Image: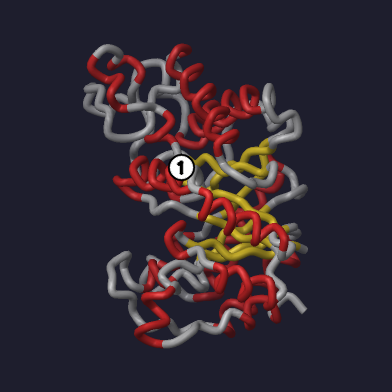
Amino acid sequence: MKNGMIIHPGELSKKWIDRLADAGIDTLGIHPEGGKDAPKTLERLLSLLETPEYRALIDYARSRGLEVEYECHAAGYLMDKSLFADHPEYFWMYAAGERVSDWNFCVSNADALSLFAKRAASLALALYGSSKNFYFWMDDGRGIHCHCPKCRALSPSDQQYIALRAALDEIRRHIPDARLAYLAYIDTITPPTLAHNVGGLFLEYAPFEKYTAKGEDSAIRIERERAMIAPLLEYFGREDAKVLEYWYDNSLFSRWKKPPARFVLDEKAMSADIRDYRAIGFDRISTFACFLGEDYEELYGEADITPFRKAFE
């Protein structure tokens, strides 16, 4: 079973790489911040990846045995909003019937889908040192799928599936063995209703809402999670199925604001979750570990990441 930790691009350092490698972590994930500014944070990452200094860090991570992956809310970057003036039909329609350019796009528009796919291929090629697993998530929010007459019958999960399927087909023209993650998260936490996955897409299950639900009994939550996971695994299969967790995500616990809060790991809950995920049949488990970089260390000292790796023993 593989494990990984995911940090923000600006937090990457030789020290972080050594900490991960020395702790026995398998995968270094790099995640540009999500939300409304996700296109800009992805652009900044791509600029960093053009510099010799950042590439040297990626090379060093790989030399220490770490697999490097980039996980990003990419739809807003891949569908350039400047196109809206000439091609509003490329963009999503909200339920009231107006097309807007702020989130996602119209997956029923063939030209928009083709453009999205071609830009996804270019993005895959630009991610220096990446593994063959790519994570090009849709935009980060709720209720932001297209409601145009053609898309209206498609669930958010269906719309994500259509976008990812087109993107993967184009990426594989350049990287034949590429794989693409389907992010089961918020509005796409249920599987698509379209014909079953024909290969190349793998499940990434991100249980964000268990950290925002209030007053829920843990036993009830676990049963509800199992009920959600089962159809996702049935649809996508268990091969390469991955959990994306938040146990070390100090950006979440700091409410995405700096300075970061002091981080306190709930080791008991993490260990119980890992046992459960392994029993269900996941191949890989990663956790966000953002807001634990140099600015955190200056305030509180170094956060201990070794309990994460030990929980797999």
Identify the image quadrant of the N terminus: bottom right
User: Residue at image x 62%, y 58%?
Assistant: 243
Relative to 297, is 309 on the left or the right? right
Identify the image quadrant of the C terminus: bottom right
Residue 259 location (% of width, % of height): 28, 74
Task: Identify whether 12 is placed above or below 311.
Answer: above
The amino acid type found where label 1 is placed reads Leu
User: Residue at image x 45%, y 39%?
Assistant: 74
Task: Identify whether 135 is placed above or below 306.
Answer: above
Relative to 71, is 301 on the left or the right? left
Residue 247 shows in the view: yes
Front residue of 224/233: it is: 233
Give the quadrant of residue 100: top left
Give the color scheme: rainbow, by chain, secondary structure or one colour.
Answer: secondary structure
Give the quadrant of residue 21: bottom right
Residue 133 location (% of width, % of height): 66, 44
Q: Residues within 10 Å of mark 1 (few under 14, many from 20)?
A: some
Secondary element under disc 1, as helix, strand or loop, is helix
Front residue of 206/177: it is: 177
Instruction: Report the number of numbered marks.
Output: 1
Give the quadrant of residue 122: top right
Task: Identify whether 286 is placed above or below 266.
Answer: above
Front residue of 136/162: it is: 136
Residue 95 location (% of width, % of height): 27, 29
Q: Residue furthest front?
A: 52
Q: Residue furthest bottom?
A: 300
Residue assigned mark 1: 46
